[in-house]
Amino acid sequence: MLQEFDKKIKTDKTSKPKTHSLLSLMPYLRRYPVMVALSLGALLIAALSTLVLPFAIRLVIDQGFVGRDETLIDGYFQLLLGIVTILAMASALRFYCAYWLGERLVADLKRDVFQKLISFSGAFYDQNHSGEIMSRMAADTTLINTAIRANVSQALRNMLVFIGGLVMMVVSSPSLSFMVICAIPIVVLPLVFYGRLVRRLSGKAQDVLADLNQYGSEALLNVRTVQAFGAQRHVIEKFSNSNEQAVDAGLVRTKARAALTAIAIFLVMASIVFILWYGAHDVMTGAMSPGALVQFMLYAVFAGGAMGALSEVWGEVAQAAGAADRLTAFLDLTSQVKEKQAVKKFDDEVRGQVSFSDVSFSYPTRPENLVLDGINFTVNPGEQVAIVGGSGTGKSTLLQLLLRFYDPDEGQIQLDGVPIENVSLDNLRAQFALVPQEPALFDASVYDNIAFARPGASKESVIKAAKAAQADEFINRFDKGYDTFVGEGGQSLSGGQRQRLALARAILHEAPILLLDEATSALDAQNEEKVQTALQELMAERTSFIIAHRLSTVMKADRILVLDQGRIVEEGTHAALMEQGGVYAKLAQTQLQADG
């Protein structure tokens, strides 16, 4: 899947976006048939009105001026005014409908892509930066929006004017039209060749800009670390260098587009001047009327102008096509953690029995490194099981497999005797309440962060959960209490405060199985004792998995599983494991010496 993602999403230097990629957006346009019909209808009327103007002017010249009939002149100018009015109204309607469709299509596409992104498993984000993805999505949707509301509509109109202009040129003068048709390859071939270069440069500029945005986003997200190490100058210098590269890439693209525009205008207009010179001789010999020459001239100008405009927007349409390719490629990807078509839901209350049977697992980014190797154990309903071991022994991985952030390479995990891959992901994860080691808090209020576990929860239930997590006291010390914003990632809070908010969120979730991953690691001794009391009350009615290094956290567990190199090497109560004098006893002794 990730190779496919890299191929489709990350722009290849040799890739050449095809404009027909925009057809992948057709399902979104079909949702709004009325607006599409109005837009196309207005576009057609505007194009026809433009094409009627030269014919009306010919009538004014040949029948009005030559015949010196004032009544006819007045009538023809009234006709011209009517055509211009229709053209203006149709153009305004086309602009509004195209703008509306662009905004609506991009909003729908963003929603669908984000819905897809939020469903991808951990394996996807192990190899792809979320900041880069969001930056590219923002840039690509902007390109598509501009293309739909302006460039595509303008390109279609110019295409109609160009084709209509050519047809009317033939009607006006077949001989002059033949010369125009012969000149078309001379004009078009250089534009096509040069246009490909512009598209390649545009893709490169987009890549450089995406890298710049990603680096800037990461630097701001970790601004405190940057400042703590006094690395502002280094970060600013690196950002400035990347910024200059983005500017240089943009200028190269702009120069190429400017040259393309100049070439297009010169070739088109030079051809028109030559052909009109030839036509002027036909008027002198009487082979054409003055009005017919003016009509042909206007159609030639319209067709030439339409072709020149097409060349200007072609690069932007091609960029939008590439953007559509990248975004719709997201929609074609599938998560490595897949739901079966026929999935089970836990309709009744879950008892909380969990079993691992011969489970082995390695992360997709390190397939050669076996994190878990043949894990077997069963946790009974209501049992408190602590998982201990050194760093990198697979403790947190067990919880991630339970939540199906990943699927095991071998073996099976069951909940109440049901293989978890047979349960819908939403229903499965609803049975767990997670308190991670690094709590994920949003740049929102304290209330919103706790209520995230149960959207729409009442203020009373949120306060009750906060009190149970020993968080109500420090929350009420804030000026705005539960309405206080915690900052991005909860950076305005201490580590202990963040952990207690995460614990309150888990308590509010009221799930039958509790997952505690170093849930009290950031608490001081006094607050840890309070939270431990709250946890004991909470765990008394739930199956609980406890990952911790502190003896005070694990020694009260009903059972302790000791992991070493991906295997369960010891199992038992704190007292029994201390008597064995094995891995657990050594870990405990090391901690006691460190605490002492």
Image: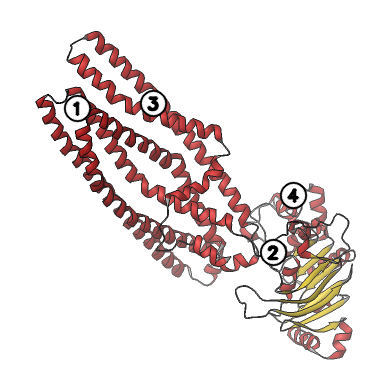
Residue 185 makes an appearance in the image? yes
The numbered dot on residue 78 is none
Tag nearer the camera, 4 or 1: 1
Residue 100 or residue 525, whichever sits in front:
100
Q: Are marks 3 and 2 in contact (CB under 8 Å)?
A: no
Q: Look at label 4 and name its amino acid.
A: Pro
Q: Which residue is mark 3?
A: 88
- Which quarter of the figure is the N terminus placed in? bottom right
Tag nearer the camera, 3 or 2: 3
Q: Which residue is mark 2?
A: 439
Q: Look at label 1 and name its amino acid.
A: Leu
Q: CA distance from mark 2 to mark 4?
A: 18 Å
Q: Residue at x 35, y 37 (%)?
A: 158
The earlier-in-sequence mark between 4 and 3 is 3
> In the picture shown, does residue 461 fall above or below 166?
below
Q: Look at label 3 and name its amino acid.
A: Ala
Q: Which residue is mark 1?
A: 293
Q: Which residue is mark 4?
A: 455
State the image coordinates of residue 29 (x, y, percent, origin top left): 54, 40
Q: Are marks 4 and 3 in contact (CB under 8 Å)?
A: no
Residue 388 or residue 151, whichever sits in front:
151
> In the picture shown, does residue 36 fall above or below 565?
above
- Which quarter of the figure is the C terminus placed in? bottom right
The earlier-in-sequence mark between 3 and 1 is 3
* Disc 3 element: helix
State the image coordinates of residue 378 (x, y, percent, origin top left): 85, 74
